[in-house]
Image: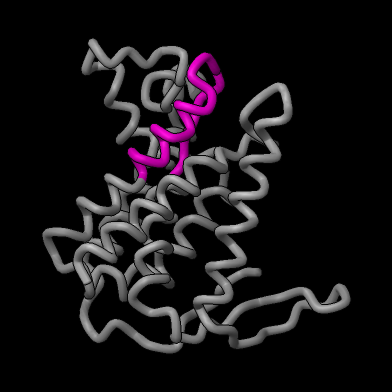
Amino acid sequence: MIPLRDSHPAGRFPFWTIIIISLNIFFFYLEITSVNIEAFIAQFALIPSLVDFSNLETLKPFITSQFLHAGLLHIGSNMLFLWIFGDNVEARFGFFVFPVIYLLSGATGGYLQYIMMPESSIPMLGASGAVAGVLGAYFVYFPNHNVKTLIPVFGFPTVMEIPASIMLIYWFFTQLFSGFASVSTTTAEIGGVAFFAHIGGFATGWVFAKLFR
């Protein structure tokens, strides 16, 4: 399912949503144009095996990794979800709280993924955990909004309006199932997707939305 837009505009200028999307695009540009992409990723991505909680320098990637992406599809899908759902959540959290919850969701998601695979040397990168936090908050605040969604029906792309609650519940349980399915494999990732980062981010956004509500 690919969301296209929600049914209720936020009614205010989405300052932080636009800033965050712009920063992601900017850092993705720096990443793909760097002289040595592998070195760039190694410096800013979250590599679980290098995390040392007694060394603050090794904890920076819990934040910096949120602004790197593995390709155009990766950044495109993350920014699409953020653009559609971020404005309403930003309006509800407010100017000062929204960016904090966004970054905290990403860091918490990264930490949960780290717990599941602490010895991994595979770089973790992407805004998925932070964006999942936005989805978790959206689920609390706006479950009855409709989302115009592109859905394949018998192989044909079809646009339908579905309740946000149904879409986000479906999304969350696909992440939950995929995450626990990945535990039974030799690595805590399937196809390079950090499912537990999505789960942790979603849960963080959900909890803080409940608290602020």
- Relative vertical location of residue 79 with respect to residue 187 in this rendering, above or below: below
Residue 92 on image: x %, y %: 22, 74
Q: Residue at x 51, y 25 (%)?
A: 123
Residue 100 on image: x %, y %: 20, 51
Residue 137 on image: x %, y %: 35, 65
Total numbered labels placed on residues in the image = 0
- Farthest residue to the right: give it: 154
Q: Residue at x 37, y 16 (%)?
A: 51
Q: Residue at x 25, y 71 (%)?
A: 14
Q: Quadrant of the N terminus?
A: bottom right
Given residues 182 and 4, the one toward you in this image is 182
The reply to whether the magenta stretch includes residue 137 is: no
Residue 187 on image: x %, y %: 66, 24
Q: Quadrant of the C terminus?
A: bottom left
Given residues 32 and 150, the one toward you in this image is 150
Q: Quadrant of residue 112?
A: top left
- Relative vertical location of residue 76 with respect to residue 84 in this rendering, above or below: above
Magenta span covers which residues? 106-126
- Relative vertical location of residue 168 with respect to residue 103 in this rendering, above or below: below
Given residues 176 and 98, the one toward you in this image is 176
Q: Quadrant of residue 22?
A: bottom left
In the displayed structure, does residue 93 sit left or right of residue 1? left
In the displayed structure, does residue 188 sit left or right of residue 137? right
In the displayed structure, does residue 211 sit left or right of residue 154? left
Tell me which colouring the rendered structure shows: one colour
Q: Residue at x 33, y 31 (%)?
A: 62
